[in-house]
Image (tube, grey):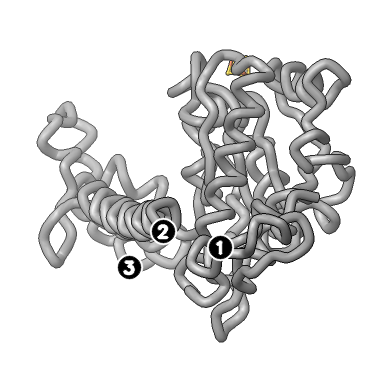
């Protein structure tokens, strides 16, 4: 055990005592324990999983960095390595497993597929990025990433943990006053549906029904079908007779704007919040290094 890792520079410890005494903060002590005992969950999805297995095996041996044993149950794991292509069928159990992991928990997207769909992006059966469903902490690029790249990503995650503070609820939301909400489990139907976007999907269906009743009405959720049934029947003949123009596909919400712009807006706000948190962590790290 290297006590010098724990020492904070503002309270210098005499050189002859550095190996026996450490003066540190509770956050730093807590993070130090947590970053050196991350247990990844034991599961793999595709070719990237082979590289992950190699990283755990004797040549690279991620136990050296504290990742130690992979656990076969989510209840004993605090790191989810999404290693491989995430299909629409598999994203459902993956989110369910994530919800079963205890806090604090982290997600690492390994490879091009988990990060953004990879070579199968826009495929009929593939999710274009795990971050559409779970909060990803670290992305490891590559197809597949080498074991060295995965190790680098895991060390990046340890650095991220180093910068967290248990005094700052924004850094570690699970210490907040209320309990964390589980991530909604996506619904596998004709296409994957994220329940968090249900309002947007419903509004889009309603807009489709009112603008192009003959086409949109057949995909309406049951509760809105009744309301728009009359309009749908009246417009069916006209809509069927004329081809759909691309203008008709830009739906406008009652408050102005389109559902897609609204989703972009939400994404942009999340991105800004993440960047602000990152800047705080960077300045805190710089202050520690300078001190
Ligand atoms: S990123 Fe490449 S290696 Fe990894 S799962 Fe996708 S196709 Fe396979």
Q: Is residue 13 visible?
A: yes
**Which element is circle 3 on?**
helix
Mark 2 lies within 8 Å of ligand 1 (Cβ measured): no
Which residue does the numbered mark 2 point to in the structure image?
291
Q: Is residue 266 visible?
A: no
Residue farthest bottom in this picture: 177
Q: Residue 227 got which mark?
A: 3
- Tell me the quarter of the image containing the C terminus: bottom left
Classify residue 193 as left or right of residue 224: right
The correct choice, above or below, for 157 with respect to 172 in the image is: above
In the image, ligand 1 is in what quadrant?
Answer: top right
Q: Position of residue 19 (x, y in %)?
A: 76, 55
Which residue occupies 48% across, 67% down? 10
**What residue does disc 1 label?**
8
The residue shown at (78%, 41%) is 67
Near mark 2 (Cα within 10 A), the count class, few <14, some 14-19 or many ≥20, is few
Q: Residue at x 85, y 55 (%)?
A: 76
Given residues 19 and 166, the one toward you in this image is 19
Q: Gap in Å between the C-alphas at discs 1 and 3?
A: 65 Å
Q: Residue at x 65, y 52 (%)?
A: 5
Q: Are marks 2 and 1 in contact (CB under 8 Å)?
A: yes
- Give how far apart the Cα atoms at labels 2 and 3 are: 66 Å
Q: Is residue 185 left or right of residue 164?
A: right
State yes or no: Cβ of the residue under disc 1 lies below 8 Å from any atom of ligand 1: no
């Amino acid at each position: 055990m290297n006590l010098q890792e724990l020492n904070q520079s503002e309270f210098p410890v005499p050189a002859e005592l550095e190996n026996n005494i450490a003066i540190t903060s509770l956050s730093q002590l807590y993070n130090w324990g947590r970053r050196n005992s991350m247990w990844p969950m034991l599961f793999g999805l595709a070719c990237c999983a082979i590289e992950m297995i190699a990283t755990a095996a004797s040549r690279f041996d991620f136990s050296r960095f504290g990742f130690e044993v992979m656990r076969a149950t989510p209840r004993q794991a605090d790191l989810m390595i999404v290693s491989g292509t995430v299909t629409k069928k598999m994203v459902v159990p993956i989110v369910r497993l994530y919800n079963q992991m205890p806090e604090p928990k982290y997600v690492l997207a390994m490879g091009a597929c988990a990060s953004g769909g990879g070579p199968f992006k826009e495929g009929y059966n593939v999710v274009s990025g795990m971050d559409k469903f779970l909060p990803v902490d670290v992305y490891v690029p590559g197809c597949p990433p080498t074991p060295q790249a995965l190790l680098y990503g895991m060390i990046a995650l340890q650095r991220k943990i180093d910068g967290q503070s248990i005094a700052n609820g924004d850094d570690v939301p699970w210490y907040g006053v209320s309990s964390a909400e589980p991530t909604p489990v996506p619904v596998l139907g004709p296409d994957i549906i994220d329940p968090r976007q249900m309002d947007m999907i419903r509004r889009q269906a309603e807009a489709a029904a009112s603008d192009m009743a003959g086409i949109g009405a057949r995909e309406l959720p049951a509760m809105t079908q009744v309301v728009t049934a009359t309009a749908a029947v009246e417009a069916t003949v006209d809509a069927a007779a004329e081809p759909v123009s691309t203008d008709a596909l830009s739906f406008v919400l009652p408050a102005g704007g389109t559902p897609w712009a609204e989703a972009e807006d939400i994404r942009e706000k999340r991105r800004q919040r993440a960047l602000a948190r990152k800047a705080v962590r960077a300045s805190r790290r710089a202050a520690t290094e300078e001190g």
